[in-house]
Amino acid sequence: MSETRSDGELLRAVAEDADRRAFEELYRRYAPWLTARMRGRCADAGIVDDVVQETFLAVWRGTARYRQDAADAAAGGARGDAAGWLWRIASRRLIDALRGAGARGRLRQTLARLRHRDEVSAEEHVLAGVEHGDLAGALVRLSPELRAVLQATVVDGLTTREAAVLLGIPPGTVKTRAMRARKQLREALA
């Protein structure tokens, strides 16, 4: 009967020797627990399964490195706690996956709207007026900074944070400029 190896021993065997049996034992030991923890954070089982798989792939490929200090290695223990280490890797990957899913969802919605453009939308009516009406003159009179914020937040539909990244300014500045632009447009159109 074989002796059960510590987490530190398993991780060292995987990192140093590409020991497949050590990896499989580590996977059997932690994958169910990690999956359960991730499902507590994300209801989409597909995303959770992908995150758990990517976490263990990072361990196998060596892109995630487990660090143990000399005293713990000599004692056969795991200073940083392998479970906590795996949790940190998985939680970062989950955040990345959810961010990607959000972007993909917005892209799908945009594409769906473009596919169903038989009717003229209210936005298109407004934009047609922009080209030829009083609004066009009011927009031209705005400073380039205010116009850029309106373009990003209203026309492009970006969030304040996304507009800030796009324009290279702080989110608070985006909010202030948007407020000033709306105020100037109200005054010009009143």
Image: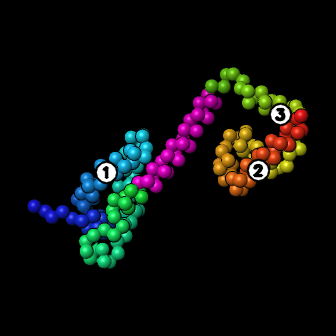
As shown in the figure, which amino acid type bears the numbered disc 1?
A: Trp
Question: What residue is rendered at 42% in x and 40% in y?
Answer: 43
Residue 51: x and y in percent read: 40, 49
Q: Nearer the viewer, residue 42 or 24?
A: 42
Q: Inspect the image, locate mark 3, and give the three-letter code of the amino acid beneath it.
A: Val
In the displayed structure, would residue 166 be above or below residue 127? Answer: below
- For the C terminus, the image quarter is top right
Determine which of the numbered discs, if any, sits on residue 146 in the image: none
Element on which disc 3 rests = helix
Q: Which residue is mark 1?
A: 33
Inspect the image, locate mark 2, and give the three-letter code of the amino acid beneath it. Thr
Specify which label sits upstream in the sequence, 3 or 2.
Answer: 3
Q: CA distance from mark 1 to mark 2?
A: 46 Å
Residue at position x 88%, y 35% in the image: 189
Magenta stretch contains residue 104: yes
**Left or right of 91 on screen, residue 184:** right
The colouring scheme, among rainbow, by chain, secondary structure or one colour, is rainbow
Circle 2 SS class: helix
- Compared to 134, does 143 lie above or below? below
**Mark 3 sits on what residue?**
130
Q: Are marks 1 and 3 in contact (CB under 8 Å)?
A: no
Q: Which residue is situated farthest in the left direction here?
A: 1
